[in-house]
Amino acid sequence: MALKEIINMDEVLEQIRLELSAGNWDAVTSLLETLRRSDQAEVFSDLPPEQQQEILPLMDPVNSADILEELEDEEVLEIANRMETDRLVEIVDEMEPDEAADLLGDIPAEQAEAVLQRIDESDEVRSLLEHPDETAGGVMTSMDVHILADMTVDETIQHLRGLSPDSETIYYLFVEDKAGHLVGVVSLRDLVVAKPSTIIRDIMDDDPIYIQVGADQEEASRLMFRYDLLALPVVDANRKLVGMITYDDLLDVLEEEATEDIYRLGGVPKEQPADVALSSAIKTRLPWLILNLVTALLSATVLSVFEDTIAQVAVLAAFFPIVAGVSGSAATQALTVTVRGLALGDIAPKEGFKTLGRELLLGLVNGVSIGIIVALIAFVWKGTPLLGLVVGAATLLNMVCAGLAGVVVPMLMQKLNFDPALASPILVTTTTDTLGYLFYLGLATLLIASLV
């Protein structure tokens, strides 16, 4: 097959749009089929739904399957819902079992069952559909190569040739006993260099890294990342081999989890495309904004307690944004590091005090530095040394508390089985704002006679 050059996707998309405007559907499909699968998906995704619906029936089922495997789940669901069952069967039949299971798990049950009854690998896909999406079983693919420990190298190679497995499934060969239990792993390299009469048991690693089928997909990604694995075997409660997770599945998991964390740190409970329906955006965002409003009332309450102080020393109001803003940024830094550490498994529950101590020390050092700078700014700006002392001291105290909140809140949320990334930002922001005003105005109240 001829090598494909790296092409300018904007130019290709423009050419396809020109052909579409002229009604040259055959030219459009020909252009798409010359592209790499990821490029096909990128171009296809940028086309309007009505044009997508016209193009897919004209393409080879293999190319259609490649496109759907590369698209986001939400896009695939929309396309599948607009597609006739006969055409959907042709495309699903060409998909990898794990990708087919992902698609069929999202469409209506009746439509999924109609497709399952007509595809070739229905049993494999059905077995994958039994597992929740965000577990190891939900992201694994089925095994099409089964190697026994008492087979010879020559028998194994002949077995592989007879199966002609997909290239993505044979980085390692996972070895089973006669009952199907995972007992070892052997690499292709070891298989190729060994003598034909060698028994697999003699060259395999008899302590393979594996994961339970019900484990969280994040745990699978951590294992694969930590041990540089290209594939990870998945076993059931009896250690029977039920499937494996490949590196491309891992990349999908990492992208999904990172995206989820970013959205949740921003107070958005689930991923939303930029063009999400207005009603959906309101439904997911408004409740958290209301919760934020409720917690913000705590800060307002603190301010109301010190109304007399503010009235007597109006200049205090000028420094509210500094005291709360700088400390809020410090809290966000601590929160981000802690949430990411919890997500990656870098911070274990037993390491909580160590992490807390580090952030408190960091908050103290940063607080002293920022506090001195803020105090100097207040003194130079307003010409009142005592005001500078109050602003600087309040900033120092609040930055120490910011480090405390940035660690304690997410760890407490995890302990209570809440998502730290979703619940923590609102609580941490409330803590830094409320304490900032309390320290600042409390100190000012104590020294008000000297400030007036």
Image: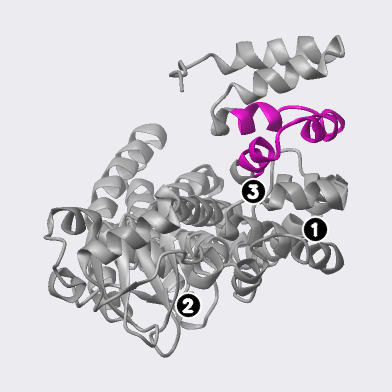
Image point 45% across, 83% down: which residue? 236
Which element carries disc 2, helix, strand or loop? Answer: loop
Crowd band around label 3 with a 10 angstrom C-alpha radius: few (<14), some (14–19), many (20+): some
Query: Comparing marks 2 and 1, which lies closer to the viewer?
Result: 2
State the separation of the CA atoms marked 3 and 2.
25 Å
Residue situated in front as seen by the camera: 249 or 147: 147
- In the structure shown, which secondary structural element does the residue marked by tag 3 occupy? loop
**Tag 3 near tag 2, CB within 8 Å:** no
Identify residue type, mark 2. Val
**What residue is at 23 percent from the left and 62 percent from the top?**
154
- Image disc number at residue 194: none
Which residue is disc 1 drawn over? 283
Nearer the camera: disc 3 or disc 2:
3
Q: Is residue 37 above or below residue 19?
A: below
Q: Give the residues in magenta.
A: 40-68
Residue 162 in the image: x percent, y percent? 41, 57
Q: Earlier in the sequence, mark 2 or mark 1?
A: 2
**Mark sitting on residue 94:** 3
| Residue type, numbered disc 1 | Lys
* Residue denoted by label 2: 213
Q: Nearer the viewer, mark 3 or mark 1?
A: 3
